[in-house]
Amino acid sequence: MQYLDILYGLVPPFLVSLAFITPLLGLFVKSRKFFMLYAIVVVATATVIAGIIARNIFTGVDVALYPFGGWPPPIGIAYIVDKLSASLALLASIIVLLSVVASTSYLENYKPSTLSYIYTAVLGFTAGVMGVFYTGDIFNLFVMMEVMCISLYVLVAFHRTRAEAVEAAIKYSLVSIVALVLYFFSTLLIYGSYQTLNMADLAIKSRPSEFGYYQSALLSGGYFADIRVATAIAMAIIIWVFTLESALFPNHFWLPDAISEAPTPVSAVLPVAEMASTYVVIRYLFTIFGPDSILAENGVRSTVLYVLLALGVVASIVGGVMMALQRDAKRLLGYSSISHVGFIYMALGLTAFSQEGRLPLMAAIFHMVNYVVTSSMLFLAVGALEKASGSRDIDALAGVGRYMPVAGTSVVLGVLNLVGLPPLGGFFSKLMIYQAALEVSQPVIALMVILATAISVMGYAKLLLMVFGTGVKGLNVKEDMRFSLPGLLLAVILVLLGTLLPVGLYEYLEDVCSAMYGYKKYIEVFLAYMASLLGR
């Protein structure tokens, strides 16, 4: 285990610092190419660091801790990185990097001053996302979510002369601000109950069977004398907040507008924000308040999982139905996101029926990765087609993919993966959800997986019209590889997700899920660091 390697705490401060510098550069630098190259180099550097961190975690460290300023947790803020957070952070940085590359095509006609402010927001967003994955402190998680969401407000409102874009940004910002204020309140409840904000410390104190109850001096009287009540209230708020941020039905209402009105490279990173929020739910439900925690004693945790399961089923079906009604390609993909977030939470909910059911959690994580890669790829491909045709209307895009083979290939692969065609990863992740439902004796949920998939086919067929339709003939267009190639690189990752499953990826998922249930691996690094400070 490692404690003091500054690399583990470098990425978010590095990105935030350069984000603050970017507007100042805009006062002096009047070159579009400079800001484009600047953003690519900065995000690429963050991606390399994330890759080094992931390599260190997977080659023997398992869990790494970095205390900021040398202040020991739980007094100070600490980053705690394990295999799940390291993997998702690396994936997020790769997607953001490819989206930044695609943005050089999208923004080629904008003023350098415009580029300076949009890339400021992009770097801020990346810092926030990476901080969400790496942090081991629930209050620092609040700060990182604020950084991520504020950056997204700016990015969604980029086309500020369009009333629809401004409306989408206002809608998202208002609900997100309310949600994060409520999350801040939940951190106060948790701190008042446990006297700590450190995730590993909370994981210790929330398990009364092993460590005893930790009563609060701050909340020692009246209704809140029993920390189980305060914990249940805090957890209910936390789940509501992060299901809203991940666009789970019925808190999905902000996503279709935001994802369709944002610039296409921004639309491609919005699934990353959803992945970060879903990761937080997983971290709370499995590391901090797991199946042997204080929330499991009176059935609160199981109730939460049952609710997530029900909402996941409804979301997967509602998203599929709404897809079939759309004519805007990006809006259709927005409802596709809602449907697949439903599949993810459906799998998470199935863990309620098994004390340590590895397969449901494995299915949730694998489907989340599949969905994020595929959605980002499809947004970039649709963006390339939109730039060539000047429209996002599916009827106007019919057949355009014939003349743009790279973008067209990405569309076909993406659709087939989201539908779940073997041997692509989407097939295996849906199969895992199906098998998980049968494993815990829930055949109705297994049927819901099939039903939701069948309903979504109608919407995905519309996307295939962009490649195989006959609406456009004799189109003379040169494919812009700055837009199409990043999507194709994501397609390579997509194919690897399916082909590598039998040769190591499945074992990786098992290892990650075992670590999530076996919380002791997560807290051992915290305890070892504290022991090292005390000279033990």
Image (spheres, rainbow, N blue to C red):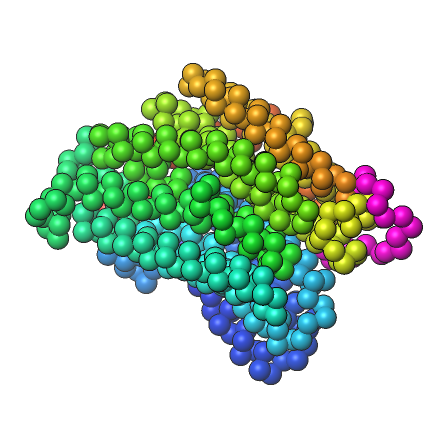
Near-viewer residue (10 or 337): 337
Tell me the residue at 59%/73% (across/down).
116
Quadrant (top left/top right/bottom left/bottom right) for the N terminus? top left
Question: Which residue lies most toward the front here?
Answer: 325
Of helix, strand and loop, which mostly describes the magenta segment? Answer: loop
Tell me the residue at 36%/22% (across/down).
354
Number of disc labels = 0
Quarter occupied by residue 423: top right
Residue 182 appears in view: yes
- Rendered location of residue 485, percent (x, y): 73, 51
Q: Is residue 480 magenta?
A: yes
- Residue range of the region highlighted in magenta in the rendering: 467-483
Tell me the residue at 33%/35% (across/down).
304
- Rendered location of residue 151, percent (x, y): 49, 63
Question: Which residue lies most toward the left here?
Answer: 221
Whether 346 is drawn above or below 27: the answer is above
